[in-house]
Amino acid sequence: MQHKITQPHALLDEQGNLIEAGYDTTLSLLYDRGAIKAPWYRIKEWDYYFLGNDEAGIAVTVADNSYMGLDSITLFDFKNKSYITKDFMQWFTKGNKQLSSSSKYGDIRIVQKEYQIEITHKEDYRMIDLRVSHFKDKKDLVARLILKSEPKDSMVIATPFHTPKHFYYNQKINCLRVEGSVSLGHEVIRFQPQNTFGVLDWGRGVWTYKNTWYWGSASGIINNHSFGFNIGYGFGDTSKASENMIIYQGKAHKLSQVTFHIPTHEGQDDFLKTWTFTSDDQRFEMSFEPVLDRHSHSKVLFLSSNQHQVFGYYSGKVILDDGEILLIERLFGFSEKVMNAW
């Protein structure tokens, strides 16, 4: 069952619970951090961007998880199967980062001695400016990236947890066209909108302590039209709606439940072997050929995070709402499994 939200209204009731669980194609429910009734240290807010192609990419995270904040920049070299991450953590941010209540507005400006992140909303595009001192071999990273052609529809989901006053409000915007450059010393990586795409993961919510989630995303060109998808599960109660959606020519096509099949070896996930994906409505059937596993495993006191974000190529087929079949051949994207106690 896939329940669609059709009318704008407040996200939470007076008790801090979701008024309506379901999916949408625009950010129509009104998020207000002040309406949350759960303990302050359970509130999580973040903006995450991945921008790239099958040669290079960059990921930017700005997160305020109340008891801690995280700013992170990762530069990917997919040709050489390598990446570099710089993380900057702060304690007890408690919402002081003032992340916006909507992805449609609210600029981010973080200026520190070691780094700078600026995300600016213009009338018809977003601009990301980055600077990190001594990013690699004492070389500074400097970037300016322009994100255009935001599609009309995007994946939006309002998900409750079984714990009262806990929820997840999330938007994933696929198919953003990326133009700009990233400089590392004298080396310059240039991105062109013909072959470079971005995705925004905008999340606000109150999460339970332990979660394991799965997320997959890809954007590109199919049949000379913009195409992307978002798939995932593992957080909260998704009985009313899943986050599985195709975006084709800017229009959303809703999928039911998609299952990730990660290969195993001797009882452990083998992330660099070929994955497969199936859906209960048989509208998303895909294989995934990994190229690079961005693995991060950290543990600090009572907090732990084990992340595998795997980049590679999707191949298979999807079926649109009208029954049209699209064949997918080596579409670059990522798929991840994340286990957090946070």
Image (spheres, helix red, strand yellow):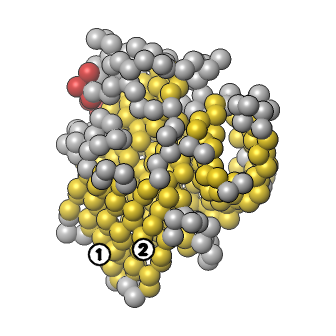
Q: Position of residue 89 (x, y in %)?
A: 30, 55
Disc 1: CA contacts within 10 A as few (<14), some (14-19) or many (>=20): some
Q: Position of residue 183 (x, y in %)?
A: 39, 79
Q: Earlier in the sequence, mark 2 or mark 1?
A: 1
Q: Which residue shows up at 71% across the image and 49% down it?
A: 269
- Amino acid on which disc 1 is placed: Ser
Real-space Cα separation, disc 2 to disc 1, in angstroms: 17 Å
> In the image, which disc is placed on residue 233?
none
> In the image, which disc is placed on residue 181?
2
Residue 109, image quadrant: bottom left
Report the side of 149 relative to 90 (left or right): right
Q: Which residue shows up at 47% across the image and 25% down it?
A: 158
Q: Nearer the viewer, residue 44 or 54?
A: 54
List the residue tagged with mark 1.
Answer: 133
Q: Secondary structure at mark 2?
A: strand
Q: Nearer the viewer, residue 85 or 281?
A: 281
